[in-house]
Each structure stands twice: as C-alpha cells, then as structure tokens.
Image (tube, rainbow, N blue to C red):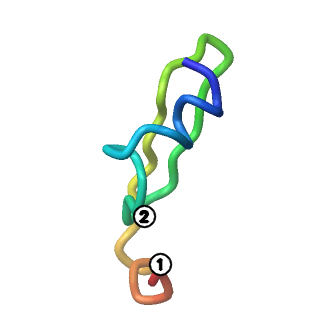
Amino acid sequence: MNWQEVCDDPILQNLPYKLELNRYGEVVMNAVRMEHSFYVE
C-alpha cells in the first residue's frame, strides 16, 4: 500500500487516531495515550 491508496480509502478517512505507513507499506495505527486524549479533537 502507498500513501495515495491510504488517502483514497474511505475506510481509513476520519479516523480518531494517527495513521502511518511503515517501510513495507503496512498501515500502522497509533492510539493516543489517555493523558493526551483530552487534547485530540
């Protein structure tokens, strides 16, 4: 998967957490830690 495919995928849009691709093109989702969740919109 490349970044353009991630941006075009409707399932991956508007997620409440950070989304990255690793060097193998795999999606990596990092949940926000509890103390930072108050600042995330």
Vertical comparison of 30 with 4: above or below: below
Pick whichever, 5 or 35, lies toward us.
5
Residue 7 position by quadrant: top right
Residue 13: give its label: none
Q: Position of residue 25 (x, y in %)?
A: 58, 17
Q: Quadrant of residue 31?
A: bottom left
Taking 23 as reference, is 27 left or right? left
Binning the other alpha carbons within 10 Å of mark 1 as few (below 14), some (14 to 19) or many (20 upward) gives few
Q: Residue 35's x, y, as percent?
A: 42, 80
**Residue 33 falls in image quadrant:** bottom left
Q: Residue at x 38, y 65 (%)?
A: 16
Vertical comparison of 23 with 10: above or below:
above
Q: Which mark is residue 36?
A: 1
Mark 2 element type = loop
**Residue under label 2:** 32
Amino acid type of the residue that numbered disc 2 sits on in the rendered structure:
Val
